Image (cartoon, rainbow, N blue to C red):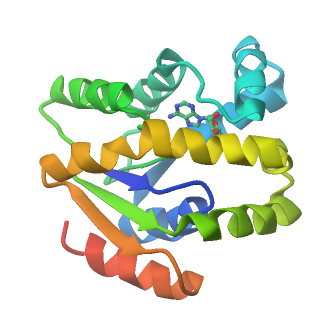
């Protein structure tokens, strides 16, 4: 099994690019954000717990998303690998992922990072808000907090994965097709 991590700030285009990536490389797309939004829509206890944090632009507790990832790894078999989108989000989650994969002698195949400058993040989120109507895209305060959370908690993972030689970055500016082609030529190597 291959384990790809799709990395990047909010609004970088991870969800959009993931669709093309999973199709071309026969991967299972695991978006922790999408799984959490599904729990919220279903009105589950977990969803209720997550909603307040998501609406505030904070991360939900590590155990919640770690449990979701493990259960997907256990149940999905008929694919060439997994594409993790929005996970890991901090160093604790990255270490936990390494530990889960070590149990089956696996490890992270590669990190594909889509980078866009801070100035473009808000523009992209505003555009998405008009299309998808996500609650956490609607408030300026939530967006600012998500960007701060990204810099504070998630960005240190760039160094974490650079140290293990797993980190690869593509420029996220340009058309969807241009970015997709850059990602494909990178992924063709693995
Ligand atoms: P996303 O769809 O990846 O932008 O995620 C939306 C929100 O879900 C985030 O702002 C977090 O509140 C929460 N979330 C998603 N993935 C994680 C994660 N790996 N760890 C903690 N919180 C997460």
Give the quadrant of ligand 1. Answer: top right
Query: Is residue 31 in view?
Result: no
User: Residue at point 45% right, 30% down?
Assistant: 69
Q: Where is residue 41 in the image (x, y as percent from the top left)?
A: 82, 32
User: Residue at point 41% right, 33% down?
Assistant: 90
- Give left or right: position of 153 versus 140: left
Quick check: 84 above or below 57?
below
From the viewer's side, name the closer residue of 173 and 108.
173
User: Residue at point 44% right, 66% down?
Assistant: 114
User: Residue at point 44% right, 41% down?
Assistant: 154
Work out which residue is located at the far top of the displayed protein and give it. 45
Quick check: 128 above or below 94?
below
How many numbered marks appear?
0
Quick check: 183 above or below 121?
below
- Give left or right: position of 159 versus 130: left
- Give left or right: position of 7 versus 139: left
Residue 176: quarter of image: bottom right
From the viewer's side, name the closer residue of 167 and 108.
167
Query: Is residue 118 in view?
Result: yes
Q: Where is residue 88 in the image (x, y as percent from the top left)?
A: 41, 37
Residue 166: quarter of image: bottom left
From the viewer's side, name the closer residue of 119 and 138.
119
Residue 76: quarter of image: top left
Q: Where is residue 50 in the image (x, y as percent from the top left)?
A: 70, 22
Which quadrant would the C terminus be assigned to in this image? bottom left
Q: Position of residue 127 (x, y in %)?
A: 79, 69
């Amino acid at each position: 099994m291959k384990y790809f991590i799709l990395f990047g700030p909010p609004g970088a285009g991870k969800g959009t690019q993931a669709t093309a990536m999973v199709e071309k490389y026969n991967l299972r797309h695991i978006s922790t954000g999408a799984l959490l939004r599904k729990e919220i829509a279903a009105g589950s206890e977990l969803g209720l717990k997550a909603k307040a944090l998501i609406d505030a632009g904070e991360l939900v507790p590590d155990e919640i998303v770690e449990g979701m990832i493990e259960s997907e790894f256990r149940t999905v078999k008929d694919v060439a690998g997994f594409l993790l989108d929005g996970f890991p989000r901090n160093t604790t989650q990255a270490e936990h992922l390494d530990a889960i994969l070590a149990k089956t002698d696996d490890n992270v195949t590669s990190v594909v990072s889509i980078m866009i400058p801070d100035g473009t993040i808000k523009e992209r989120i505003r555009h998405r808000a008009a299309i998808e109507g996500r609650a956490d895209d609607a408030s300026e305060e939530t967006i600012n907090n998500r960007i701060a959370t990204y810099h504070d908690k998630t960005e240190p993972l760039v160094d974490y994965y650079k140290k293990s030689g797993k980190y690869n970055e593509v420029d996220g500016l340009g058309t969807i097709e241009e970015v997709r082609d850059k990602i494909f030529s990178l992924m063709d190597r693995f």
